[in-house]
Structure formats: structure tokens, C-alpha cells
Image (cartoon, rainbow, N blue to C red):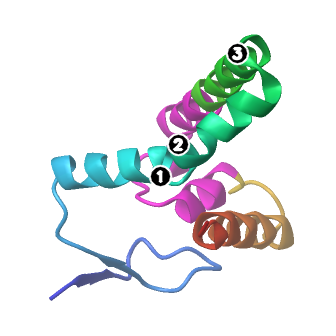
Amino acid sequence: SEETSSSEEGICSAPIKYGKNNAWVTAGIIIADVVGAGILSMPVAVKQFGWLLGAILLFLLLAANVHVSLLMWRVQVRCESCKHVRTYPQLAEGAFAAAPKWQRCAMTCVSKFSQTSFIF
């Protein structure tokens, strides 16, 4: 049985159902998602680019990933309306709380789409 939160609903979002995952299960899911199928294509990419360019591109992507993660963390820590968010769409909605309603809805929809459309 899952809980449904209606108090944390945003202006453009449907009710969110929260599961019963603990921190270890969630960390495992995140690691599996990040490593995922991308690790299977890594040898082919390094073969095509070569060892030097492959390593450089890998570190550039690592830097981009860390940068975006830090930006999202800063938004959640510094944004008053983002203190208790649990999902990316809620974070986007809180970050755009002072923006017009259409921009807030657009960013919420973009974050929902980007979070749920990355299947491969």
C-alpha cells in the first residue's frame, strides 16, 4: 500500500504516490540508473574515439554531471519553496515559484517528460 500526498501537490502536478523505499534501495536504483546501459556502450565509444579522447570525454561528462548535481542541490538548499520537495518536477516548480504560471507549468512538464522519457 502506498501513501498519496495531496498537501505537497503543485499547481500543475497530479497527486504523487510515495513508495516504501529506504535510503539503500534508493541509492541502488540511482546507481543502476546512472551506470545502466551506458556502461555497455563504453568500450565501443572508447574504441571509436581512442583512449585519449575517450578518457577526456569521459571526464568532461563527469564534470557536467557533478556540476548539474551541485546546481540542483543549491536550488533545493537555498530556495525556500523547495525545502521539502521529493521529486524533480516539484523542484522545478519550486524554483520557478515567482515566475508566471505558464512558465512554471512549462518547466514542470519539461522536468516530468525528461525524467520519465529516458528509457534506453
The type of residue carrying mark 3 is Trp
Which region is colored magenta? Answer: 68-95
Looking at the image, the residue that sits furthest to the front is: 47
Q: Which residue is drawn at 74% across and 22% down?
A: 57
Q: Where is residue 31 in the image (x, y as percent from the top left)?
A: 37, 44
Q: Is residue 4 left or right of residue 33?
A: left
SS assignment at label 1: loop
The type of residue carrying mark 1 is Gly
**Residue identifier under label 1:** 36
How many neighbours does mark 2 have within 10 angstroms: few (below 14), some (14-19), or many (20 or more)? few
Q: Check whether the beta carbons of the residues at disc 1 and disc 2 lie within 8 A of each other.
A: yes
Q: Residue at x 65, y 18 (%)?
A: 59
SS assignment at label 2: helix
How many neighbours does mark 3 have within 10 angstroms: few (below 14), some (14-19), or many (20 or more)? few
Image depth: mark 1 or mark 3 in front: 3
Q: Check whether the beta carbons of the residues at disc 1 and disc 3 lie within 8 A of each other.
A: no
In this rendering, is residue 22 above or below 42? below
| Distance (Cα) linking label 1 and label 3 | 22 Å
**Residue identifier under label 3:** 51
Between 20 and 106, the residue placed more toward the observer is 20
Q: Position of residue 27 (x, y in %)?
A: 28, 46
SS assignment at label 3: helix
Q: Is residue 104 left or right of residue 43?
A: right
Q: Which residue is drawn at 53% across and 54% down?
A: 37
